[in-house]
Amino acid sequence: MDSNNLIAFFGWCSIINFCVFVYWAGMVLLAPQWIYRHSSAWFEFTESQFSAIQYVFLGSFKLFIIFFNLVPYIVLRIIY
């Protein structure tokens, strides 16, 4: 792959993953009861455990987006 393809790849990965993050965070903020009812049918946990799990997963996902999509994109933009 040449540098332009890598820059485009990481740029689009950043955009798509950020959109997934915003959708997920919006659902957690706007419809937490619906998500809890839907998820508790599969798994046994309390609402406070569910909130903690969502908080940790959202934070982890945000860090993964930054470190594995956004930082390589910025570095490639600076280098090339």
Image (spheres, helix red, strand yellow):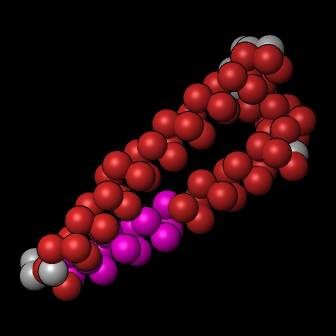
- Quarter of the image containing the C terminus? bottom left
Residue shown at 32% from the left, 52% from the top: 68
In the image, taking residue 34 as reference, residue 27 lies left or right, namely left
| Chain part drawn in magenta | 5-17
- Quarter of the image containing the N terminus? bottom left
Compared to residue 36, the image places residue 16 above or below, namely: below
Report x, y in % for residue 51.
Answer: 75, 26
Report x, y in % for residue 75.
Answer: 23, 65
Q: Residue furthest bottom?
A: 4
Report x, y in % for residue 44.
Answer: 72, 15
**Type of secondary structure dominating the magenta stretch:** helix
In the image, taking residue 20 as reference, residue 65 lies left or right, namely left
Compared to residue 41, the image places residue 35 above or below, namely: below
In which quarter of the view is residue 38 placed?
Answer: top right
Residue shown at 76% from the left, 53% from the top: 26
In which quarter of the view is residue 28 placed?
Answer: top right
Residue shown at 59% from the left, 40% from the top: 58
Compared to residue 74, the image places residue 51 above or below, namely: above
In which quarter of the view is residue 8 placed?
Answer: bottom left
In the image, taking residue 24 as reference, residue 10 lies left or right, namely left
The verdict on residue 55 being magenta is: no
Q: Residue furthest front?
A: 78
Report x, y in % for residue 73.
Answer: 30, 68
